[in-house]
Amino acid sequence: MHMQHQVLIVDDEPAICWALEKTLAGEGHTATIASSAEEGLRLAEDQDFSMAFLDVRLPGMDGITALPKFIERTDAPIVIITAFGDLETAVAAVKNGASDYLTKPFRLEDVLQVCRRTLQTVEAQSAEASRNQDKTSLATSAASMVGGSAAMQQVFRQIALVADSDLSVLITGETGTGKELVAAAIAKHSSRADRPYIVTAPVALNPELIESELFGHVKGAFTGAIGDRAGLFEQAAGGTILLDEIGDLPMRIQVKLLRVLESGEFSRVGEVRSRVADVRVIAATNCDLVAAISKGEFREDLYHRLSGMQIHLPALRERVEDIVPLCEHFLSRLSTPVSVDLSDEIIEELQQRHWYGNVRELKNAIEHAAVIARGRPLVIADLPINAVNRPSTAGGENGDSAATPESVVEKWVKNQLAKDDSNSADLHAKFLDDFEPTLMQKVLQHTGGNRAKAAEILGIHRSTLRERCKEYGLD
């Protein structure tokens, strides 16, 4: 089995439960045991199980009576356990919704056969559901790409040229420019579109287990490896994998990835034999990889392998003509009614802002304004304060050398309190929404986009930083 599963065992015979539990553990699965149907039903309601074994003869409610109740409470397939003389009962149970049955006394081989057959079906259904979800997500992502500027038209041409090939692609650009959308569009329009599309970022993975997460491991490879496990490269077999924030990939994993790109093969952790990696690799970064190479932080040979084609996404301030179409697009997709007509005044304001968080920041700002406007046409006061876009207000890019953090905050507070009382509540949360992105943006710029270093400077966990960056449009 490639995946680890949680299995429910409902049987009042300790020896049967022990045998089933040990057999499942040998396959890398875990078991939860209930000695009655009533207890099993409570567990099925509170927990998610991949499958369940249900004995026919139980104290209290019998298994046949309990079967329809289990089917109501869980999507997990139910395997009926019955004595040899109850075979007809077991067959009838299968007709009424049980997925399979075991007859006592059973052999270990019988349990393994039923378990593997059932869980293979579960995994196949899960994979199909995931593929369908990915297709919907890909279609939505591709539809979200808006841009009539010459710079974006060039990006669209590159996507069209590279999509149907198997070239690796390196997508570069500042945070919030839409690198994940480009990767999703490439996957959607490729010959692998009906296969898995997996997105992962090394910074989001456990540093100690990153190799296992990407390439899988075999039982006993390290403490806690109780069974074989497929990594993301196997889960993406035949499809596409996006390695976001590739600049944060540890050097030892860079070597492994280079081998995948050069030979098309990899090995699970603790495994000698090689496996075929039929996966198209797309990488994305907001870091300057050339500078990272000169510092010895990124392998030059890996950089060239990843750059089968390189697509650079321009910053929003470099394609100002796309701001209005983007705003109209975001407004049209809101669930609540809102006017998409933008006044000349607000267009001028939007176009003069720097948008260091790029399209993601613009989207957040427009959605923020729409909530404040409540259906009426947007005005400048509806937009979030321009703190993120004017980082020099404490130093005077606009000639205001007397501006201080205190004066900036004072101006912000006055602006908030001047609005309706209903909109000026919860100032602390609003203050964080408006000013925390600036702090994170500046620290990330200081570290050259290295999130691990930025998180250390900020004194927060890097997973927290990653979530905040997504929330604030700095991703």
Image (cartoon, rainbow, N blue to C red):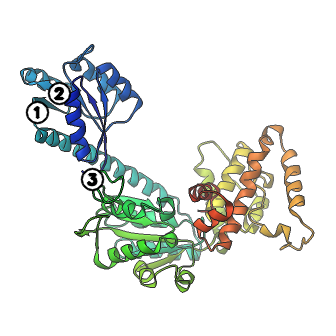
Q: Earlier in the sequence, mark 1 or mark 3?
A: 3
Which residue, given by chain and number where applicable, does mark 2 sit on? Answer: 81
Q: What's under tag 3, amino acid-wise?
A: His
Which residue, given by chain and number where applicable, does mark 1 sit on? Answer: 106
Question: Is residue 469 visible in this depiction of the protein?
Answer: yes
Residue in the picture at 69% in, 54% down: 341
Q: Residues within 10 Å of mark 1 (few under 14, many from 20)?
A: some
Q: Is residue 56 above or below residue 314?
A: above
User: Does residue 246 appear to the left or right of 360 in the view shown?
Assistant: left
Q: Nearer the viewer, residue 102 or 185?
A: 102
Q: Earlier in the sequence, mark 1 or mark 2?
A: 2
Circle 1/circle 3 CB separation < 8 Å:
no
Q: Give the residue at the far right of this rendering.
A: 402
Q: What's under tag 1, amino acid-wise?
A: Phe
Whole-Å distance between the Cαs marked 1 and 2? 9 Å
Residue in the picture at 13% in, 39% down: 108
Q: Nearer the viewer, residue 329 or 264?
A: 264
Q: Quadrant of the C terminus?
A: bottom right
Which residue, given by chain and number where applicable, does mark 3 sit on? Answer: 2
User: Does residue 146 appear to the left or right of 211 in the view shown?
Assistant: right
Whole-Å distance between the Cαs marked 3 and 2? 25 Å
